[in-house]
Amino acid sequence: MNESEDDFVARRRADWDEMDQLVDGRAWHKLPGASIAHAAALYRSVAADLMRARGAGYTPELIALLDGLAARAHASLYSAPPYRLGAVADLLLREFPRTVRRYWAFMAFAIFLFVLPGLVGFVGARDSRAFALHVLPEEAISQMEESYAHDPGQGRQDGDNAFMAGFYVHNNVGIAFRCFATGILFGLGSVFFLVYNGLVIGAVGGLVYSAGHGTNLLTFAAGHSAFELTAIVISGAAGMLTGYSLVATGGLTRFGSLRRRSRQIAHLVLGAAAMLVVAAAVEGFWSPSPVAARVKLVVAGGLWLMVILYLTLAGRRGGARPA
Amino acid sequence: VHEVQGVSLDNTATVETPERIRFTHHVAGPVRRTLAYLIDLLLRGAVLLVAGLLSTGAFTQASARASWGLWLLILFVLEWGWNVGFEAFGNGRTPGKRALGLRVVRDGGYPVTFIDAVLRNLLRAADFLPAGYLIGLAVMAGDRQARRLGDLVAGTMVVIESRTAVASRIVLAPEPTAQELDLLPPRPPVTPDEVEAIELFLRRTHLSPQRRLELAEMVVPTLARRMELRPSDPLRFLGVLYRRATRTRGAAEAAPPRAP
């Protein structure tokens, strides 16, 4: 009955080697049916070997080997569902707008935290240059005044558009991600970034307006702002939802409570990121284009309407997928 | 329950499967993970450098600006997408983690999903604060499974994949003769634990001969005294004793000898 370790290894080794190769090979769901059944049977036999090795008191090396092998096989057998391309469409067309609506109160609060400082920044910077200097660094101010002094449709070279689009993706999506991630600090980071970004954007507007170039800024920014400002607000709301889940735990542990909502939070952030990529494309190529200001404003109105309709209506019908 | 070699409980994570089998994962600490991070950082830097060199090639002014835009896009993708992509589609391993034998797994030992990878890597922005991942390191220090904020949110941990080789078969050269075996009692007065210890020792072939002898000399007198023997070669004695004991091991376990 009591097999020596050497005999045990000699008898079972072939199966272990086979399991080892299977685990390192292709994802199991891509194997033919018979092979999957074989792999599952092999896994159970390795698991039994592990139990036997523990019970018989074989050497730690052997137990560690079987432990690692069985654990990796377990991960392969119970692996994550394969990725489907349809999931991306599902996220953008259904889950994201649904989740935005579900947490409308967070959205409303995020809008408040963003718009109010925005108004303060605008009025303050319009009326007082000293105020603007508190919010923005001086070189940024002079650069801003210069760049909006002329019509945005002129003065950019061809390559500049692509350069600026790249810059906006890098900069703005990064801002949104940080705005979300710092929400883990009980929501405080998101609150800070929402208020700060609102203040800065408002101050820029006020400054340019007081210099008499308000129309230039409006025609430039109206189009992409539909995506950009909305996405920043949604990221901030996702961050505040993160912080809220840490505080209102409903009897769970703090992170247990958070993990209950983590999928939805991820949906919000991914959706916001997609909107920011669209925003960067618009900001890089459309906003600076030499189209008449009136056309730009009409298109911007259309884009705002589109974003609002998308967030309020998309995914209202259609079956819910199991999470 | 058999403890895993010399590892204290606080850096292992035990996972129980639906089949009621327990696996022990070895949780990776900050040093290994930092090294893996640095390797990834170097690789990302190398990719950026190549992209940058291509961008500054002999282009006209306009297309050079455009290619810098592309470069910024690549910078963004590398900054936020490198880890997400490799972890989601490479079953929890970036090149740096691969080099150090690390893998990101879900708490139950399952492979990470895309959503997990997104969450744990976006939260780097929070773990990084105020500088150099200070918050992340502090949180790791306080967590039994060395998880940073991103891991806690996504429900993941980073484990070390142990790939030990099967212990080599015990070879005694030459095999003990019947005469040698008969010098010992048919049921040597050693406990199963002692037999296991001897077995472990005999498998430690990577030790130097001097060290093996030194270790054997420490333990053999105690064992030999029980059998009133004075072996001249301690190493040989342990080998013969092991063979003698394991041949009757079932009987020895049924009636463990009392220590004298």
Image: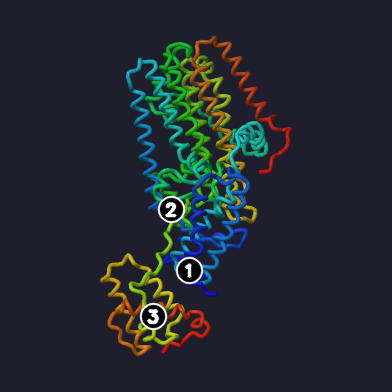
Residue B239 spot, x, y in % from top left: 36, 76
Do badges 2 and 3 share one subunit? yes
The amino acid marked with disc number 2 is Ala
| One can see residue B3 in this view | yes
- Residue that badge 2 annotates: B138
Q: Nearer the viewer, residue A238 or A55?
A: A55
Alpha carbons under labels 2 and 3: distance apart: 51 Å
Q: Nearer the viewer, residue B62 or B129?
A: B62
Q: Residues within 10 Å of mark 3 (few under 14, many from 20)?
A: many
The amino acid marked with disc number 1 is Asp
Alpha carbons under labels 1 and 3: distance apart: 19 Å
Residue B242 spot, x, y in % from top left: 40, 77
For residue A7, which numbered disc appears in the image?
Answer: 1
Which numbered mark, 1 or 3, is in the foreground of this view? 1
In the rendered structure, the answer to whether residue B165 lies left or right of residue A86 reads left
Q: Please determine whether, in this image, residue B35 is positioned above or below residue B27.
A: above
SS of the residue under disc 1:
helix
Q: Nearer the viewer, residue A112 or B187?
A: B187
Residue at 44% across, 49% down: B135
The amino acid marked with disc number 3 is Leu
Which numbered mark, 1 or 2, is in the foreground of this view? 1
For residue B241, which numbered disc appears in the image?
Answer: 3
Residue at 36% across, 75% down: B175
Q: Please determine whether, in this image, residue B246 is positioned above or below residue B20.
A: below
Q: Of label 2 and label 3, which has the lower sequence position?
A: 2
